[in-house]
Image (cartoon, helix red, strand yellow):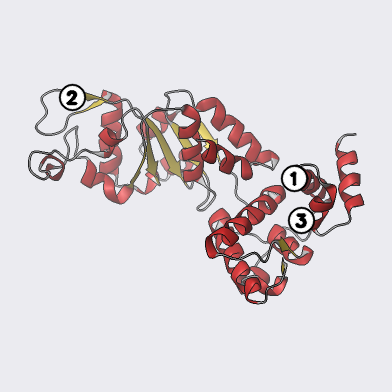
Amino acid sequence: MVHLAATAAVVACSAAMMEAVALARRLAPLTRPVALVGETGVGKRLMARFIHAQSERAGPFVTLCGGEVLDAIKPPLTLDERWASGVGQTRLRSPFEQAQNGTLFLEDLPLWPREAQSAVLHVLEEGSITPRGVERGLPLSCRLIVASQRALDELVNAERLLPAFRWWIGDFVINVPPLRGRFPDIAALSYHFLDRARQEFGGSLPTLLEPEALDRLLTYRWPGNVRQLRGAVEWSWVQAAASAVERIRIADLPPPVVRGETAAASVDLEARRALSRWAFERTGGDRKRAAQLLGVHPNTIDNHRRAATR
C-alpha cells in the first residue's frame, strides 16, 4: 500500500492532478462505484490501484477487460459453463468472486458489447452472483471501478454506454487530466522513470536531464500520456548510457519527441516556479541539487520559492 501511495504521489505535483488524487482519497473508503475518465495512457489503472490501496480492503485488485467479460459471466446471473467445469471437483471462480472484499476494475467499459454491459449491470443491481452448480446467490462484496476514455454523458448520447450504467455511476466520477501542460508532473515522472531505468537496466549514468532536453519533454504534446513518457525516458536513458554521459541530451530523445507537435511554445513563469518547488521538495531542501535537476542557478530556485510565498 505504501508503494502504491508513493507512486501516485509522484504524479500529483500539478494542481489538476493533486485535485484528482485528493478526490480519489475522499472516495476510497466508500463502497460506491467510481468512474475514472481520461485519455489513453494517463494512468487510470494506477489511479484505480491507488483507490484500492487507500480503501484498505482486504481482498485483491482484479482487472476485467471487455474482451474477457462474456467469458466471465453470462446473463442474467449465471457464469459461463467453463467456469463451472473446472479441473476435477474444483469450480473455477469468476472475476466477481475473485475480487470479493476487494476491488474489481472494469477496463474500457464503453468498448464492451452492450450484452456484456447488461450482464455486469444485472449483477450489480441484484447485489449477488449465482454460479452454475450453486444453489444460493453469492453476495457481491467487491468495490467496482470503471474506466473510460470519453465523458460518460457523451458515450450515452453516442449509444456506446447503457444509460442505466451512467445513472448507476452517478456523480462519482474522477477526471484524470492528460499529461500535456502538467509541467511539474512531467518533470517528476521523467526523473521517476529515469531512476527506474537505472535500477532495471543496470548502470550509474545518466542521472540528470540537460535543460534543453527537459524543456522538450515539458512542452511536447504527449498523445500517449504517461505511458509514452515512460518509453521515451527509457529510450533516452539507453541512448545516453551508451555514451556514459551524466545528463540526457536532446539528441538522446526519441525522434518523434524531438520533431513532434508541442502543447506549449515554452514553460511560463508560474510553471517554472512550480517546477522549482517540486525540485526543492524532491531533494529534501537542497537548493544546489534542486538546481541541478532543472539545470538552473541555485539563486533561481530561491527566487521562485520566495515569489511563491508572497
* Residue at (41% x, 38% y) in the render: 146
In terms of sequence position, does the residue under pointer 2 or pointer 3 come before the other? Answer: 2
Q: Are marks 1 and 2 in contact (CB under 8 Å)?
A: no
Residue designated by label 1:
278
User: Alpha carbon of mark 2 to alpha carbon of mark 3: how far?
Assistant: 57 Å
Q: Quarter of the image holding residue 84? A: top left
Specify few, some or many for label 2: CA neighbours under 10 Å numbering under 14, 14-19, or 20 or more.
Answer: some
Q: Position of residue 7 (x, y in %)?
A: 57, 43
**Does 127 appear above or below 85?**
above
Q: State which quarter of the image contains the C terminus.
A: top right
Q: Earlier in the sequence, mark 1 or mark 3?
A: 1
What is the three-letter code of the residue carrying label 2? Gly
* Residue shown at 46% from the left, 36% from the top: 35
Q: Judge whether 254 appears above or below 85 on screen.
A: below
- Amino acid type, residue under disc 3 in the picture: Leu
The residue beneath circle 3 is: 293
Q: Is residue 108 visible?
A: yes
x and y percentages locating residue 190 in the rendered image: 65, 56
Q: CA distance from mark 1 to mark 2?
A: 51 Å
The residue labelled by disc 2 is 137
